[in-house]
Image (cartoon, rainbow, N blue to C red):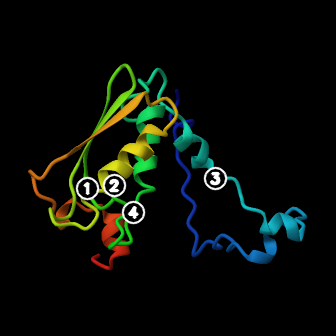
């Protein structure tokens, strides 16, 4: 290469014109949308993702149909003195589903002197046994560890004004 082809040319300017600013009027007009379309609920893109079940999940493990059905049934049972379901209240210590679809629920009550101490385990057993796929249900009522408010979910604390 010769020296002539390597030369740079420098152009000096006092100022450059700024790029044009974006304006609402310059935007493309929106597609014609009827009033019904505007009020219709837009598609939730996470909906399908969140509804997807793990492939090959055991029905008795978290994410499985039987386990999730049992949890949903437990969330329908409310403590008569507190307007929160027993699952979010932290009264359910464990849910075990055997390969034969027998469910064992380990739970407690807020106090040993709870007015529903006699009826609550029976209601839990009845509701869980009604879940499709459950062969039978056994409820184990325990007092150790004792229940305390730290076992409540954030949803329950919010419902009771504790958050």
Above or below, 67 against 77 in this view is above
Per the image, the residue denoted by label 4 is 78
> Observer-nearest residue: 122 or 20?
122
In the structure shown, which secondary structural element does the residue marked by tag 4 occupy? loop
Distance in Å between CA atoms under marks 4 and 2: 9 Å
Residue depth check, mark 2 versus mark 3: number of the one nearer the observer: 2
Inter-mark Cα distance, 3 to 4? 30 Å
Give the spatial CA distance, label 1 vs label 4: 11 Å
Binning the other alpha carbons within 10 Å of mark 2 as few (below 14), some (14 to 19) or many (20 upward) gives many
Label 3 or label 4, whichever lies nearer to me, is: 4
Residue 58 % position (x, y)? 41, 23
* Sequence-earlier tag: 3 or 4: 3
Q: Quadrant of the C terminus?
A: bottom left
CA separation, marks 2 and 3? Answer: 28 Å
Is disc 2 placed on a helix, strand or loop?
loop
Few, some or many residues within 10 Å of mark 4 (<14, 14–19, 20+): some
Q: Residues within 10 Å of mark 1 (few under 14, many from 20)?
A: many
Q: Earlier in the sequence, mark 3 or mark 1?
A: 3
- Label 1 SS: loop
Which residue is identified by label 3? Answer: 44
To which residue does mark 2 refer? 87
Percent x, y for residue 37? 84, 63
Q: Is any part of residue 63 visible from this angle?
A: no
Residue named by callout 1: 91
> Mark 2 and mark 1 in contact (Cβ < 8 Å)?
yes
Residue 110 quadrant? bottom left
**Residue 106 % position (x, y):** 23, 43
């Amino acid at each position: 290469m010769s020296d002539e082809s390597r030369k740079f040319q420098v152009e000096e300017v006092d100022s450059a014109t700024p790029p044009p600013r974006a304006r609402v009027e310059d935007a493309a007009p929106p597609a014609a949308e009827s009033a019904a379309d505007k009020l219709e609920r837009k598609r939730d893109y996470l909906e399908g993702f969140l509804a997807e079940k793990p492939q090959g999940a055991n029905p008795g493990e978290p994410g499985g149909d039987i386990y999730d059905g049992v949890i949903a049934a437990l969330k329908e049972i409310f403590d008569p003195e507190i307007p929160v379901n027993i699952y979010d209240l932290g009264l359910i210590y464990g849910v075990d589903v055997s390969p034969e679809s027998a469910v064992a629920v380990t739970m407690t009550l807020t106090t040993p002197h709870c007015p529903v101490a006699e009826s609550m385990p029976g209601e839990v057993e009845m509701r869980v046994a009604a879940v499709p796929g459950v062969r039978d249900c056994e409820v184990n009522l325990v007092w150790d560890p004792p229940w305390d408010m730290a076992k409540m979910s954030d949803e329950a604390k919010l419902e009771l004004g504790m958050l």
